[in-house]
Image (spheres, rainbow, N blue to C red):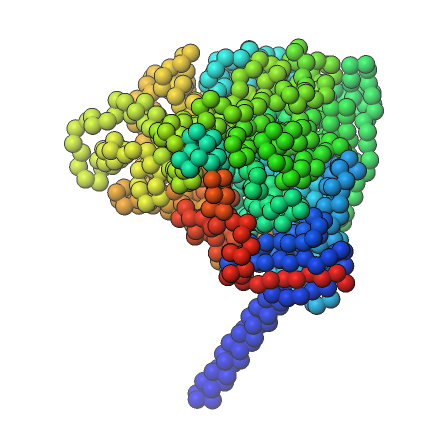
Amino acid sequence: MGLVFRWLVRIASGLIILILAAMGLVYFLASQSLPDYDQTLEVVGLTAPVEIVRDTANVPHILGQTDPDVFFGLGYAHAQDRLWQMTVMRRTAQGRLSEVFGPRTLHIDKLLRRLDLYGLAHRSVEVQDDYTKAALRAYSAGVNARLTEINEEALGRGAPEMFLFNAPVSPWQPGDSIAMIKLMALQLSGHLTDEVLRARTSLMLNNPERLADILPDVPGPGIAALPEYATLFPDLPRYAAGTDIPETPLSPLPKRGLAGASNAWTAAPSRSASGGTLLANDPHLGFTAPGIWYLAHLGLEKGGVIGASIPGVPAIMTGRSDRLGWGLTSSYLDDQDVHIEQLNPDNPEEYLTPTGFKEFQTRPSIIEIKGEAPVTLTLRWTDNGPVLPGTDYKLETITPPGHVASLSWTALSPQDTSMSASMALMNADNVEQAIAVGEQFIAPSQNLSLVDKTTIGMKLIGAMPRRDLLNQSRGRIPSPGWIEANRWQGRLPYADNPEFVAPVGGVLGNTNNKIIDRPFPDHVSYEWGDTQRVHRWERLMQSREVHTRDSFIEAQLDTVSFTARSLLPLIGADLWFTGASAPEGTPERQRQIALSLLADWNGEMNEHLPEPLIYAAWLRALQIRLISDELGPLASEYKHVEPLFIERVYRDIDGAGVWCDVIQSAPVETCTEMARLALDDALIWISERYGSALESLRWGDAHQATHDHPVLGSVPILRFFVNIRQSTSGGDNTLLRGRTSGEGPDPFQNVHGAGYRGVYDFADPNSSVFITATGQSGHFLSRYYDDQAQLWRRGEYIPMSLDLDLARAAAVGTTNLIPR
């Protein structure tokens, strides 16, 4: 027996030693790709030495004798910290993910091949100005210098993920950087999804008034009646399920309600306590680890520029110089239209145009798939744009037999000068110059908020499609592509883009709200990103005569929900403090406790409070009850509460109160009954998920920010190292926006919000501050992978200074790049 025991001990010890040795080997190999920030390196492609000083937050301050050399340094720094992210983004734009990840990403590759964003980006290189071409070439050389260093020094293939998903990394090219901007345009565009859903809902309801309830227009004049979708295509069924495409975190396609958002506001010297202009900006995108933003300071010949860049792009996209500050918010410009194309019944390779049938532009495209045989696609384009299959965006549900769908989209331009505009913006001296260079922006369309030393302004940048006044759908639902009036007719003059400069009130801002009301076809959009946050912003801005950097930070971090304050008195009007006392543990008692908590609540969506969870669950359950009978299975497409819909119903605007009646039941239900039933639904769900002690609930337990690694985030064990999860405040409609997923077992997870925050004070520019949601590094073994995450969660910032002495004082390393 003793012999057996000794052998068992030896075997167990051997296994432990082997496991430890394997773990040590894995760590050694993975750590080899950790960059050395303190070195001198000879590289090809420089004209003079470049110095990269990394401050305490690992923000690179890049200095060179010429601007191309500085962009070389940025390319090198991006590749040091975010090489895996850059290669995956490039493969996404190329439609080549399946070469590495197999069939699970095939549907993404097919769509990106059909859109041809990568090909269009490379064709756009030639239309850039000379300064931008030189910057793109230098940046590419910087990225490739890092690739050469990895190959020559055997630096762990450049990133730990490369060991698991081994594939050659081709040299970076100038067109790859333009492709990153086009990929961003795809992530920020949601009008295609909205058009399809509006068409499907129109078919289901067959009632324009009820359609205006569930998909309400932002209040204000300027919208004329539209035809029902069934009148345009009368042979379509009321409802078709559509194909569900497999979901993957690698998909760049935004779900409805999760396209771009953002906040930005500015104050003129007359509204600033310090006498200098102020600007605050926090762009909102889907959360990932690492995040999309990378902080950097570029020492350009005209002066330093500091802010947030996108790995793969040689520009500061939102930031400041000593002369100018700029911020971005999604404009929600209607820059996409779906067209239904009629096929020639005698020849399906032709489609109908205003002058007769015409052949598609076609070409084959081969997609290599890891572990499987390659797939050959036939790409088809019409005059209106690329043909998309019915399985994409559930287009099959609104496409009649014998027809296909095509997409018109401003980003599908082979002469896209958005990169040149970004480069020129960094060198602009004032608001006037910045607005002028905005004419070169094509896509994605943004509201550009601007401040110089004395002036504030905001300009919508991006190409605005010119539509015919007789357009049948006004771009709101798919329209027949063979009718001339439905087709785009070029671009509106840049002067038509909304512009606000030096307003009398001294304050400008945008929370993705409706910024202008003009009749079609000079409108900006019918679909706006938010109708709620702007009300809270107005109150905070007007509550002070003058503002400071700190008051702008306070507004960025504000968690009070205007939506909760406005809707709870409506839906609970007949429920507050009513009914007889109920015994402990009964549903009636739980309802009374919940209502008592909400009655004393000020609408603050604080992570430590129970009321936000009760409120959010109640509103969600209420909308489900209101729409499930009318929309049936289509109700599942409405994943987020629409505040204007709830308000229309409970104010009975244009008879919207009819939604409270369950049409399948004999009794006529009232809105008060629906509110009470929905609250009971919510409390049951809460008790099953978080327990029945309502006073002990925490909103932050449900509202966790999900900064997940797109590839390794679901891998057992590894996910604990690569995912960054945080309890967070805020909600769907607060200025500190934490957009919830709206689906799955955790519908209140925070999946979309401010990946970057910056506040710039031009009375003392070096007192400006910024932060990202995760960290600078994309290497999960780096201490800079998540070092900013807790600062971001707590609402803290790091200095945004152009002072090189400050950066050098506590630098974590200095890299000297010397021409070879």
The correct choice, above or below, for 171 with respect to 358 in the image is below
Q: Is residue 141 visible?
A: yes
The correct choice, above or below, for 667 with respect to 183 in the image is above
Is residue 782 rendered to the left or right of residue 472? left
Is residue 276 rendered to the left or right of residue 526? left
The correct choice, above or below, for 379 with respect to 305 in the image is above
Going 51% across and 61% down the picture, which residue do you hit? 809
Is residue 784 rendered to the left or right of residue 351? left
Going 73% across and 14% down the picture, which residue do you hit? 484
Q: Is residue 628 visible?
A: no
Of 772 and 725, which appears nearest the observer?
772
| Farthest bottom residue in view | 3
Residue 499, percent across and down? 57, 23
Q: Quadrant of residue 657?
A: top left
Going 46% across and 46% down the picture, which residue do you hit? 767
On-image quarter of the C terminus: bottom right
On-image quarter of the N terminus: bottom left
Residue 491, percent across and down? 70, 22
